[in-house]
Image (cartoon, grey):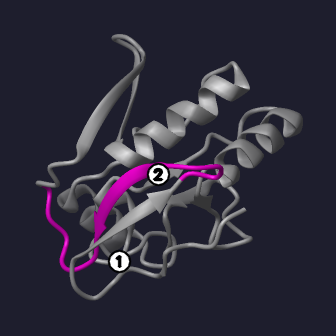
Amino acid sequence: MSAPLYDGMPPTEREFTVPKPVEGRWGRIICGGTCRDDYARIEIYHQVPGVRYVKLQRAALHSFQAAEQVLGFPILLTGVAWRSCAVQRSLWLSDKARYAHPDVTAHTRGLAIDVDQGQSAVRLAKIHKALIYRHWHQSRPDEPHHLSFGIET
């Protein structure tokens, strides 16, 4: 398990290079500053074409796909990962104890996922291990579903 590159969300926009567990790197990520919806590195992965997709920054997506490849099955999420600033703001205004402000969440940066907890405990443990090994971090013990890539939010 590797340490996060940054704890929290940087107050200003920053760029980080996320290393791979063995050698090489997953790539560069951008995070911090005020929320915006135009990150150039956001990509869509059609997990099940026409049915389910995942939207993340390129480096996070490559790490996510590598975890799926090792697992041999898709990692089911409760959403698509990335959230627009408007959607996140609406969620935050509806329940500030449950959702983070759009400026401080990794979801609006394409750097966070929420793993569907409606899977077997064995399967969830395998998913968690595969993601943690590939630079995903669980910041809060009371939120086993929420993981962020490269940073810890």
In the image: residue 52, left or right of residue 38: right
Rendering coords of residue 89 (x, y %): 25, 67
> Which residue occupies the extreme top position in the image?
49
Which secondary structure, mark 2? strand
Mark-to-mark CA distance, 1 and 2: 25 Å
Q: Is 125 part of what is drawn in magenta?
A: no
Q: Which mark is residue 50?
A: none
Q: Which residue is mark 1?
A: 104
The amino acid type found where label 2 is placed reads Arg
Q: Is 24 part of what is drawn in magenta?
A: yes
**Residue stretch rendered in magenta on the structure:** 20-37
The amino acid type found where label 1 is placed reads Val
Q: Nearer the viewer, mark 1 or mark 2?
A: 2
Rendering coords of residue 67 (x, y %): 62, 35
Dominant secondary structure of the magenta stretch?
loop
Q: Residue at x 42, y 78 (%)?
A: 96
Residue 75 in view of the camera: no
Q: Residue at x 72, y 39 (%)?
A: 127
Density class for disc 2 (Cα within 10 Å; few <14, some 14-19, many ≥20) is: few
> Which residue occupies the extreme right position in the image?
122
**Quarter assignment of residue 58:** top left
Above or below, 31 against 13 in this view is above
Residue 25 in view of the camera: yes
